[in-house]
Image (spheres, rainbow, N blue to C red):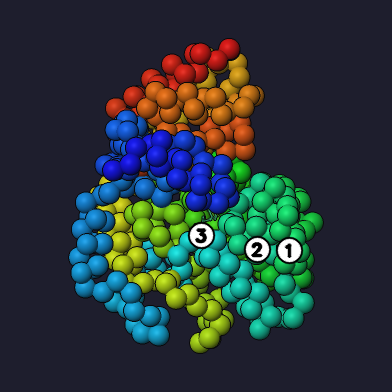
């Protein structure tokens, strides 16, 4: 077994520096607990970025993966795959959508959504109806098309030329959307709550308005629920808080209970656009990933997990508000369910590393928004423990 220092040194030598890594080497997890290579224990309120919603190594997921791995790991989408058709049916039942395409990540799900929307508009309306409108501060992934959909130049810089046909509007500003949508718009793509952009919630008024504008201009509404989906906000899907149903919905992150899988779902009319040969993925929807997702969804939907996310999420938001009142440098507490953000008037990096030293993993988006995305299975006691550590660390920073 390697220790932390050895793992870090080898990583420095052999890994590309494509992300700013934190000097921590996790080797084992159980529920909300995580252990590093030196045996230190952490309360994990990052969850692999909203992936481990059932906690680390949930027994139902581990068991499903083990059983499926002994049966069939991969074949090909040239054939019909039992766990894949079962997963598609389950998602149809709970998402309001009709059909599924499976891939391996959130970016791929959004890439597929963009391709589907473009082709749909060209077949149904005109060759010129190609524009996709997205929001500033959005995040849709790291492929060329999805960094272009992402309304933040810092993800795009250095990778030009970017694919054409994307347009950005300020988030939650219906007037700006009204000005932007037109005959050339084939789709509007939004996160109901922006995750990476700083935990920014859309209002019901906004999403209802955007849906009406889409109808008026024969544009599709795409919800990127890669982060907000699968119970994170206290409903199975975040759009269910708003009662505004999209035409296309994308999922990934928590879908596989920790195993990589993404999905692009659409209603029947839109899904019919794709003909054999139009889009595919070698690994997408493989038996192992689908078996993991089936087990995770079963647990999520029947184990009281989503109800827990809503109840414990609201308790945690109250606790954060209580804390926020103590410090002048906290400007806002926001979020839904267990996707929570605390905006600061200062840089959040010091609080993140201070918490890590004391055994709590949290993260910071946009430089100044502490983001809390713990497993949806946490208890009030876990929250109390985390809030205790957070308070100790925040006390050390001038008020
Ligand atoms: C994480 C995320 C993505 C990208 O998912 P990957 O699996 O990293 O490609 C896309 N959209 C949203 C909203 C996300 O949070």
Mark 3 surroundings: few (<14), some (14-19) or many (≥20) residues within 10 A: many
Q: Earlier in the sequence, mark 2 or mark 3?
A: 3
Q: Quadrant of residue 83?
A: bottom left
28 with respect to 198 (left or right): left
Q: In terms of image quadrants, where is residue 381?
A: top left
Of tags 2 and 3, the one toward the viewer is 2
Label 2 packing within 10 angstroms: few (<14), some (14-19), many (20+): some
How far apart marks 2 and 1 lie (CA) works out to 7 Å
Marks 2 and 3, how far apart at CA: 13 Å
**Please, is residue 173 above or below residue 75 in the view?**
above
Residue appearing at x 61%, y 19% in the figure: 329
Q: Are marks 1 and 3 in contact (CB under 8 Å)?
A: no
Give 382 or 35, whichever is nearer the viewer: 35
Look at the picture and state if 107 lies above or below 341: below
Determine whether the beta carbon of the residue marked 3 sits less than 8 angstroms from the nearest atom of ligand 1: yes
Quick check: 137 left or right of 268? right
Residue at the image point whose x is 47% and y is 46% from the top: 11
Mark 1 vs ligand 1: CB below 8 Å? no
- Horizontally, residue 177 falls left or right of residue 94, namely right
Query: Are the residues flagged by discs 2 and 1 in contact, CB closer than 8 Å?
Result: yes
Residue positioned most to the bottom: 276
Marks 1, 3: nearer the viewer: 1
Q: Which residue is mark 2?
A: 144
Label 1 element class: loop
| Residue under the image location 64 percent in, 78 percent down | 119
Q: State the count of labels.
A: 3
Which numbered tag is attached to residue 106? 3
Q: Secondary structure at mark 3?
A: helix
Q: Residues within 10 Å of mark 1 (few under 14, many from 20)?
A: some
């Amino acid at each position: 077994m390697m220790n932390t220092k050895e793992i870090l040194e080898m990583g420095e030598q052999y890994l590309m520096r494509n992300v700013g890594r934190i000097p921590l080497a996790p080797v084992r997890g159980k529920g909300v607990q995580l252990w590093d290579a030196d045996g230190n224990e952490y309360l994990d309120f990052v969850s692999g970025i909203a992936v481990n919603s059932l906690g680390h190594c949930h027994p139902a997921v581990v068991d499903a993966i083990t059983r499926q791995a002994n049966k069939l790991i991969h074949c090909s989408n040239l054939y019909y795959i039992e766990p894949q058709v079962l997963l598609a049916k389950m998602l149809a039942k709970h998402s309001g959508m009709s059909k599924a395409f499976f891939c391996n990540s959130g970016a791929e799900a959004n890439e597929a959504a963009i391709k589907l929307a473009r082709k749909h508009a060209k077949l149904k309306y005109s060759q010129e109806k190609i524009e996709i409108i997205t929001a500033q501060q959005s995040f849709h992934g790291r492929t060329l098309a999805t960094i272009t959909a992402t309304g933040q130049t810092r993800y795009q810089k250095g990778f030009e030329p970017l694919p054409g046909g994307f347009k950005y509007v300020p988030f939650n500003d219906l007037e700006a959307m009204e000005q932007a949508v037109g005959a050339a718009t084939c789709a509007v793509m939004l996160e109901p709550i922006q995750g990476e952009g700083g935990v920014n919630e859309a209002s019901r008024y906004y999403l209802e308005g955007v849906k009406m504008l889409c109808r008026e201009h024969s544009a599709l509404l795409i919800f990127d629920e890669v982060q907000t989906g699968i119970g994170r906000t206290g409903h199975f899907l975040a759009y269910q808080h708003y009662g505004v149903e999209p035409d296309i919905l994308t999922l990934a992150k928590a879908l596989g209970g920790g195993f990589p899988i993404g999905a692009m779902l659409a209603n029947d009319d839109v899904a019919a656009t794709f003909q054999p040969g139009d889009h595919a993925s070698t690994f997408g929807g493989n038996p192992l990933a689908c078996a993991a997702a089936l087990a995770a969804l079963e647990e999520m939907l029947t184990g009281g997990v989503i109800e827990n996310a809503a109840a414990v999420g609201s308790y945690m938001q109250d606790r954060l508000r209580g804390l926020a009142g103590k410090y002048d440098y906290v400007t806002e507490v926001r979020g839904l369910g267990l996707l929570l953000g605390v905006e600061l008037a200062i840089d959040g990096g010091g609080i993140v590393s201070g918490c890590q030293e004391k055994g709590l993993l949290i993260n910071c988006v946009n430089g100044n928004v502490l983001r809390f995305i713990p497993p949806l299975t946490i208890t009030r006691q876990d929250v109390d423990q985390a809030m205790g550590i957070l308070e100790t660390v925040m006390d050390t920073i001038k008020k």
